[in-house]
Image (spheres, coloured by chain):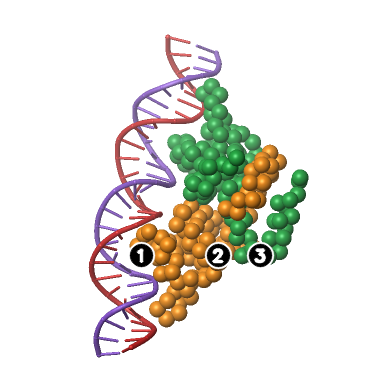
Chain colours: A orange, B green, C purple, D red
Amino acid sequence: MVDQRTAADLDAIFQALSHPTRRALIEDLATGPASVTELAEPHDISLAAVSKHLQVLEDAGLIEVEQDGRVRQCQLEAAPLSVAFGWLTQYRVFWDDRLDALADHLENEGQ
Amino acid sequence: MVDQRTAADLDAIFQALSHPTRRALIEDLATGPASVTELAEPHDISLAAVSKHLQVLEDAGLIEVEQDGRVRQCQLEAAPLSVAFGWLTQYRVFWDDRLDALADHLENEGQ
DNA sequence: TCGATAGTAAACTAAATGGTTAAATATCCG
DNA sequence: CGGATATTTAACCATTTAGTTTACTATCGA
Protein backbone atom coordinates (compact mmCIF):
# COMPACT_ATOMS: atom_id res chain seq x y z
CA MET A 1 0.00 0.00 0.00
CA VAL A 2 1.62 3.14 -1.21
CA ASP A 3 1.00 6.35 0.67
CA GLN A 4 -1.45 8.29 -1.47
CA ARG A 5 -0.63 11.51 0.29
CA THR A 6 2.98 11.84 -0.64
CA ALA A 7 2.78 12.92 -4.26
CA ALA A 8 0.15 15.59 -3.71
CA ASP A 9 1.81 16.76 -0.50
CA LEU A 10 5.02 17.80 -2.23
CA ASP A 11 3.29 21.07 -3.09
CA ALA A 12 2.45 21.79 0.54
CA ILE A 13 5.78 20.57 1.88
CA PHE A 14 7.96 22.62 -0.44
CA GLN A 15 5.64 25.58 0.00
CA ALA A 16 5.96 25.29 3.77
CA LEU A 17 9.75 25.17 3.48
CA SER A 18 9.92 28.21 1.22
CA HIS A 19 9.53 30.74 4.03
CA PRO A 20 12.54 31.49 6.23
CA THR A 21 10.44 31.93 9.36
CA ARG A 22 8.93 28.50 8.91
CA ARG A 23 12.32 26.92 8.33
CA ALA A 24 13.52 28.63 11.50
CA LEU A 25 10.54 27.22 13.39
CA ILE A 26 11.46 23.75 12.17
CA GLU A 27 15.03 24.31 13.30
CA ASP A 28 13.79 25.40 16.71
CA LEU A 29 11.58 22.35 16.98
CA ALA A 30 14.48 20.09 16.08
CA THR A 31 15.82 20.78 19.56
CA GLY A 32 12.58 19.61 21.14
CA PRO A 33 8.87 20.40 21.51
CA ALA A 34 7.85 23.95 22.31
CA SER A 35 4.75 26.07 22.84
CA VAL A 36 3.52 28.67 20.38
CA THR A 37 4.68 31.50 22.63
CA GLU A 38 8.11 29.96 23.07
CA LEU A 39 8.46 29.48 19.34
CA ALA A 40 7.35 33.03 18.64
CA GLU A 41 9.77 34.65 21.06
CA PRO A 42 12.85 34.98 18.81
CA HIS A 43 10.83 36.24 15.85
CA ASP A 44 10.09 39.88 15.25
CA ILE A 45 6.51 39.39 14.13
CA SER A 46 3.22 39.16 15.97
CA LEU A 47 2.12 36.03 17.78
CA ALA A 48 -0.81 35.79 15.39
CA ALA A 49 1.59 35.67 12.45
CA VAL A 50 3.60 32.88 14.06
CA SER A 51 0.36 31.04 14.79
CA LYS A 52 -0.45 31.18 11.09
CA HIS A 53 2.98 29.89 10.11
CA LEU A 54 2.50 27.00 12.50
CA GLN A 55 -0.86 26.29 10.90
CA VAL A 56 0.87 26.05 7.52
CA LEU A 57 3.41 23.63 8.98
CA GLU A 58 0.64 21.57 10.56
CA ASP A 59 -1.34 21.45 7.30
CA ALA A 60 1.78 20.16 5.56
CA GLY A 61 2.09 17.50 8.26
CA LEU A 62 5.41 18.89 9.44
CA ILE A 63 4.37 19.44 13.04
CA GLU A 64 1.95 17.83 15.44
CA VAL A 65 0.20 19.92 18.03
CA GLU A 66 -0.96 18.65 21.38
CA GLN A 67 -3.27 20.76 23.48
CA ASP A 68 -2.15 20.87 27.08
CA GLY A 69 -4.42 23.19 29.01
CA ARG A 70 -3.94 26.66 27.60
CA VAL A 71 -0.73 25.63 25.97
CA ARG A 72 -0.27 24.06 22.56
CA GLN A 73 2.84 21.97 22.48
CA CYS A 74 4.25 21.72 18.99
CA GLN A 75 6.40 18.81 17.95
CA LEU A 76 8.41 18.26 14.80
CA GLU A 77 7.04 15.55 12.52
CA ALA A 78 9.88 15.00 10.12
CA ALA A 79 8.43 12.20 7.99
CA PRO A 80 7.13 14.56 5.29
CA LEU A 81 10.61 15.99 4.99
CA SER A 82 11.68 12.56 3.82
CA VAL A 83 9.20 12.87 0.96
CA ALA A 84 10.89 16.09 -0.19
CA PHE A 85 14.27 14.45 0.38
CA GLY A 86 13.17 11.51 -1.74
CA TRP A 87 12.12 13.74 -4.60
CA LEU A 88 15.45 15.56 -4.56
CA THR A 89 17.36 12.29 -4.37
CA GLN A 90 16.31 11.56 -7.95
CA TYR A 91 18.55 14.37 -9.09
CA ARG A 92 21.56 13.64 -6.96
CA VAL A 93 23.42 12.21 -9.88
CA PHE A 94 23.21 15.57 -11.62
CA TRP A 95 25.31 17.32 -9.04
CA ASP A 96 27.18 14.40 -7.50
CA ASP A 97 29.45 13.55 -10.38
CA ARG A 98 30.43 17.08 -11.25
CA LEU A 99 30.43 19.00 -8.00
CA ASP A 100 32.69 17.32 -5.51
CA ALA A 101 33.63 20.63 -3.98
CA LEU A 102 30.04 21.52 -3.27
CA ALA A 103 29.42 18.13 -1.70
CA ASP A 104 32.37 18.71 0.58
CA HIS A 105 31.01 22.12 1.37
CA LEU A 106 27.64 20.65 2.40
CA GLU A 107 29.43 18.05 4.48
CA ASN A 108 31.19 20.62 6.57
CA GLU A 109 28.82 23.53 6.72
CA GLY A 110 25.91 21.89 8.56
CA GLN A 111 23.45 24.39 7.15
CA MET B 1 35.41 29.53 -1.17
CA VAL B 2 31.91 29.34 0.21
CA ASP B 3 28.99 30.15 -2.01
CA GLN B 4 27.35 33.23 -0.55
CA ARG B 5 24.15 32.60 -2.50
CA THR B 6 23.14 29.35 -0.93
CA ALA B 7 21.56 30.40 2.36
CA ALA B 8 19.43 33.19 0.94
CA ASP B 9 18.49 31.12 -2.08
CA LEU B 10 16.71 28.47 -0.07
CA ASP B 11 13.61 30.66 -0.21
CA ALA B 12 13.68 30.81 -3.99
CA ILE B 13 14.63 27.16 -4.42
CA PHE B 14 11.90 25.74 -2.22
CA GLN B 15 9.42 28.22 -3.69
CA ALA B 16 10.36 27.09 -7.20
CA LEU B 17 9.89 23.45 -6.21
CA SER B 18 6.49 24.06 -4.64
CA HIS B 19 4.60 24.13 -7.93
CA PRO B 20 3.83 20.83 -9.67
CA THR B 21 4.28 22.29 -13.15
CA ARG B 22 7.76 23.50 -12.27
CA ARG B 23 8.70 20.13 -10.79
CA ALA B 24 7.44 18.50 -13.98
CA LEU B 25 9.60 20.87 -16.03
CA ILE B 26 12.61 19.84 -13.96
CA GLU B 27 11.75 16.21 -14.54
CA ASP B 28 11.51 16.82 -18.26
CA LEU B 29 14.85 18.58 -18.28
CA ALA B 30 16.44 15.70 -16.41
CA THR B 31 16.25 13.76 -19.68
CA GLY B 32 18.14 16.47 -21.51
CA PRO B 33 17.97 20.08 -22.69
CA ALA B 34 14.83 21.29 -24.39
CA SER B 35 13.32 24.42 -25.89
CA VAL B 36 10.51 26.40 -24.30
CA THR B 37 8.00 25.13 -26.85
CA GLU B 38 9.08 21.53 -26.34
CA LEU B 39 8.82 21.90 -22.59
CA ALA B 40 5.39 23.50 -22.86
CA GLU B 41 3.90 20.85 -25.12
CA PRO B 42 2.73 18.34 -22.46
CA HIS B 43 1.25 21.05 -20.23
CA ASP B 44 -2.29 22.27 -20.55
CA ILE B 45 -1.48 25.93 -20.01
CA SER B 46 -0.43 28.73 -22.31
CA LEU B 47 3.09 29.08 -23.59
CA ALA B 48 3.33 32.39 -21.75
CA ALA B 49 2.52 30.65 -18.47
CA VAL B 50 5.25 28.07 -19.08
CA SER B 51 7.64 30.87 -19.95
CA LYS B 52 6.93 32.43 -16.57
CA HIS B 53 7.51 29.15 -14.76
CA LEU B 54 10.84 28.82 -16.55
CA GLN B 55 11.70 32.34 -15.44
CA VAL B 56 11.06 31.32 -11.84
CA LEU B 57 13.32 28.30 -12.29
CA GLU B 58 16.01 30.45 -13.88
CA ASP B 59 15.82 33.03 -11.08
CA ALA B 60 16.30 30.22 -8.58
CA GLY B 61 19.33 29.07 -10.56
CA LEU B 62 17.73 25.74 -11.40
CA ILE B 63 18.01 26.09 -15.14
CA GLU B 64 20.37 27.78 -17.53
CA VAL B 65 19.09 29.17 -20.78
CA GLU B 66 21.12 29.46 -23.93
CA GLN B 67 19.79 31.50 -26.81
CA ASP B 68 20.18 29.69 -30.09
CA GLY B 69 18.65 31.79 -32.83
CA ARG B 70 14.95 32.01 -32.12
CA VAL B 71 15.14 29.09 -29.76
CA ARG B 72 15.97 29.16 -26.07
CA GLN B 73 17.53 25.93 -25.04
CA CYS B 74 16.93 25.23 -21.36
CA GLN B 75 19.24 23.04 -19.37
CA LEU B 76 18.90 21.67 -15.86
CA GLU B 77 21.30 23.18 -13.36
CA ALA B 78 21.04 20.84 -10.42
CA ALA B 79 23.51 22.45 -8.04
CA PRO B 80 20.86 24.48 -6.20
CA LEU B 81 18.93 21.29 -5.62
CA SER B 82 21.89 20.11 -3.59
CA VAL B 83 21.44 23.14 -1.37
CA ALA B 84 17.87 22.12 -0.61
CA PHE B 85 19.08 18.56 -0.19
CA GLY B 86 21.72 19.76 2.24
CA TRP B 87 19.17 21.62 4.33
CA LEU B 88 16.93 18.57 4.53
CA THR B 89 19.85 16.34 5.37
CA GLN B 90 20.04 17.98 8.78
CA TYR B 91 16.75 16.29 9.65
CA ARG B 92 17.37 12.80 8.31
CA VAL B 93 17.90 11.54 11.81
CA PHE B 94 14.40 12.65 12.76
CA TRP B 95 12.64 10.47 10.27
CA ASP B 96 14.78 7.37 10.10
CA ASP B 97 17.95 6.38 11.87
CA ARG B 98 18.65 3.63 9.35
CA LEU B 99 18.34 6.03 6.44
CA ASP B 100 20.73 8.24 8.30
CA ALA B 101 23.37 5.55 8.11
CA LEU B 102 22.61 4.96 4.45
CA ALA B 103 22.89 8.65 3.68
CA ASP B 104 26.23 8.79 5.44
CA HIS B 105 27.35 5.99 3.20
CA LEU B 106 26.13 7.84 0.11
CA GLU B 107 27.88 10.98 1.27
CA ASN B 108 31.20 9.20 1.25
CA GLU B 109 30.93 7.03 -1.80
CA GLY B 110 32.44 7.91 -5.13
CA GLN B 111 35.64 9.43 -3.84
C1' DT C 1 -14.12 35.03 41.45
C1' DC C 2 -10.96 37.89 38.90
C1' DG C 3 -7.14 39.11 36.51
C1' DA C 4 -3.36 37.38 33.81
C1' DT C 5 -1.83 34.24 30.26
C1' DA C 6 -2.07 31.34 25.78
C1' DG C 7 -3.71 31.17 21.66
C1' DT C 8 -7.05 31.63 17.72
C1' DA C 9 -10.31 34.19 14.84
C1' DA C 10 -11.80 38.03 12.25
C1' DA C 11 -11.22 41.81 9.40
C1' DC C 12 -8.27 44.26 6.82
C1' DT C 13 -4.18 45.45 3.67
C1' DA C 14 -0.26 45.12 0.39
C1' DA C 15 2.19 42.31 -2.38
C1' DA C 16 3.03 38.01 -4.81
C1' DT C 17 1.37 34.12 -7.62
C1' DG C 18 -0.52 31.84 -11.52
C1' DG C 19 -3.19 32.21 -15.07
C1' DT C 20 -5.23 34.55 -19.35
C1' DT C 21 -5.14 37.07 -24.09
C1' DA C 22 -3.08 40.21 -27.21
C1' DA C 23 0.78 42.60 -28.90
C1' DA C 24 5.68 42.99 -29.69
C1' DT C 25 10.28 41.26 -31.06
C1' DA C 26 13.35 38.61 -33.36
C1' DT C 27 14.74 34.96 -36.24
C1' DC C 28 14.22 31.58 -39.90
C1' DC C 29 13.25 30.27 -44.61
C1' DG C 30 11.10 30.01 -49.36
C1' DC D 1 10.64 40.58 -49.07
C1' DG D 2 7.19 38.47 -46.36
C1' DG D 3 5.11 34.96 -43.82
C1' DA D 4 5.73 31.53 -40.24
C1' DT D 5 7.87 30.32 -35.88
C1' DA D 6 9.73 31.06 -31.04
C1' DT D 7 9.38 33.51 -27.20
C1' DT D 8 8.72 37.50 -24.20
C1' DT D 9 6.18 41.51 -22.64
C1' DA D 10 2.19 43.92 -21.24
C1' DA D 11 -2.10 44.40 -19.26
C1' DC D 12 -5.31 42.39 -16.74
C1' DC D 13 -7.69 39.30 -13.23
C1' DA D 14 -8.60 36.16 -9.24
C1' DT D 15 -6.55 34.00 -5.50
C1' DT D 16 -3.14 33.35 -2.02
C1' DT D 17 0.25 34.95 1.16
C1' DA D 18 2.10 37.32 4.98
C1' DG D 19 1.51 40.59 7.84
C1' DT D 20 -1.19 43.82 11.00
C1' DT D 21 -4.55 45.03 14.97
C1' DT D 22 -8.42 44.07 17.64
C1' DA D 23 -11.54 41.03 19.73
C1' DC D 24 -12.61 36.68 21.52
C1' DT D 25 -12.25 32.12 24.08
C1' DA D 26 -10.37 29.36 27.38
C1' DT D 27 -7.49 28.16 31.13
C1' DC D 28 -4.56 29.03 35.10
C1' DG D 29 -3.76 30.55 39.66
C1' DA D 30 -3.98 33.67 43.83
Same chain assignment for discs 3 and 2? no
Q: Position of residue A42 (x, y in %)?
A: 42, 62
**N-term mark: 1 or 2:** 2
What's the chain of the residue with tag 3? B
- Point out which mark residue B96 bears: 3
Expressed as whole percent of the image width and height from the top left, the position of residue B86 reads: 60, 51
Query: What residue type is disc 1 on?
Result: Ala
Q: Which residue is mark 1?
A: A48
Q: Residue at x 74, y 51 (%)?
A: B108
- Give how far across and how far down residue D26 sits, in percent: 36, 81
Residue B24 lies, with reference to residue D4, above or below; the image says below
Q: CA separation, marks 1 and 3?
A: 33 Å
Residue A98 % position (x, y): 68, 39
Q: Tag 1, which secondary structure? A: helix
Q: Are marks 1 and 3 in contact (CB under 8 Å)?
A: no
Mark 2 sits on what residue? Answer: A30
Q: Is residue B103 left or right of residue D14?
A: right
> Which amino acid, mark 2?
Ala
- Determine the chain carrying the residue at label 2: A
Q: Residues within 10 Å of mark 3 (few under 14, many from 20)?
A: some
Q: Are marks 1 and 3 on the same chain?
A: no
Q: Residue at x 52, y 66 (%)?
A: A29
Snapshot quadrant of residue A46: bottom left
Are the numbered discs 1 and 2 placed on the same chain, yes or no?
Answer: yes
Q: CA distance from mark 1 to mark 2?
A: 22 Å
Q: Quarter of the image for the N terminus of chain A: give it.
A: bottom right
Q: Is residue D21 left or right of residue D5?
A: left
Amino acid type at image mark 3: Asp
